[in-house]
Amino acid sequence: MGYFLLPLTLAADILGGYLSYYYGASLLPWLFVVVPGFLWPVLLWLITRPVWLWVSFSLPAAPPSIIPFFLQPTWPEAGLIWVGLFLLTHSYYAVKHLTRRYNNTHWGTLQPGEQRWELLQRRWHDYDEASRRFYQKCTIQFPDVRYTTKTNAPLAQWRGRLLIIREDALHPSHVSELAPELAYQLATFNSHDWLFRDILDYYPDQTPFFHILTGIGIWLPTLIKEYLWSALHWRRRVLVADKLTWVLGQGLLHYNRLAAFPTQEDRTFFSPFPLLSERKGRLEALIRTEHQWMQNHHIIPGDMAPALNPPPRPQPGQLPPKTDTSYW
């Protein structure tokens, strides 16, 4: 779906530039005619009508049609000014995106041989070994990694194709939280989702009403990003990432992590996440199917049940299961 939504978003961006032009060249001159010729007399009529009940007032004539203004723009110079405002707004969000992506103030590089580097390499090795338990081999690519010292950062987040991990998560005591999260994030790196995220980050996170009111057309691609991408693409990709987490041997840890979330679900119509119960149901089916296969092949005892019990709530000082939810 992303291969369809991306050109749709870019086409909406171009259309937003045209809308900006017609806002300045056609809509503004029409408003300058409508306000003094219709809206202001109507307002005076509404104010004076209850007072002078014995006087008969008639409403002004209907406002002129807007169609001729769009067929032949009245103020083409104003339209070009609004296109310039549209491009300036784009430049602002581009600078904001590039600053966020390349701001390495709190980033550090893992050095071969140190504990954090060894811990990360162990995770890659475990994922590779787990993926080999299937007859159909899948090739998993692993990203370049930096760590951030910001304590309020998500446990793992993307900057283009670079994965940023919170430093306090790179510790052996937090492997149970880090292992499923890294496996989950690899779905982004091993698909084009990282590219979709990178391009969409050039637009605002939410549709600004100010842009709609002032006719700056960047609101149109932002509207597609906020609603269509969430409902039609990211929701499905969450389920794909959950399955890859199971493929990489972290299904049980991931299930128990989801089971620790509050059971009450408050999801909007355009939420980028599927129902939590649906995610847990799909993971449970995969885990139980694999567990049954292992029992049938006498790999594990027949009376052993999968440990699908939700773990206790995180204790103070334990890492919360934070993820980067900017687009998902």
Image: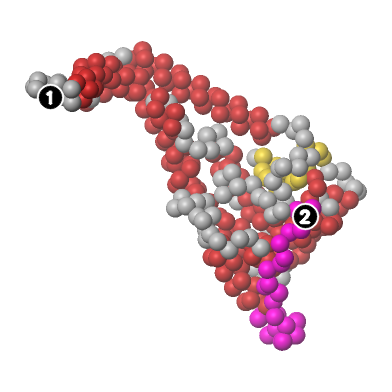
Pick whichever, 141 or 96, lies toward us.
Answer: 96
**Label 1, on which residue?**
53
Q: Is residue 319 left or right of residue 210?
A: right
- The image shows residue 110 at horizontal and vertical percentages of 83, 43
The answer to whether 38 is drawn above or below residue 327 in the figure is: above
Q: On the image, which quarter does residue 180 sit in?
A: bottom right
Residues at marks 2 and 1, CA–CA distance in whole angstroms: 71 Å
Q: Which residues are magenta?
A: 292-319
- Tell me, yes or no, whether the highlighted magenta stretch contains residue 296: yes
In this picture, residue 201 sits left or right of residue 217: right
Report the front residue among 52 and 322: 52
Give the labeled residue for mark 2: 316
Question: Dot 2: what SS?
Answer: loop
Question: Where 11 falls versus 90 (above or below)?
Answer: below
Task: Left or right? Give the position of 158 relative to 148.
Answer: left
Q: Residue at x 72, y 51 (%)?
A: 142
Residue 136 visible from this viewpoint? yes
Q: Nearer the viewer, residue 98 or 189?
A: 98
Res 232 seen here = no
- Residue type indicated by callout 2: Pro
Q: Earlier in the sequence, mark 2 or mark 1?
A: 1
User: How crowded is the residue under tag 1: few (<14 C-alpha within 10 Å), some, or many (20+)?
Assistant: few
Query: What secondary structure is the magenta-colored segment mainly?
Result: loop
Residue type at tag 1: Leu
Q: Residue at x 55, y 33 (%)?
A: 202
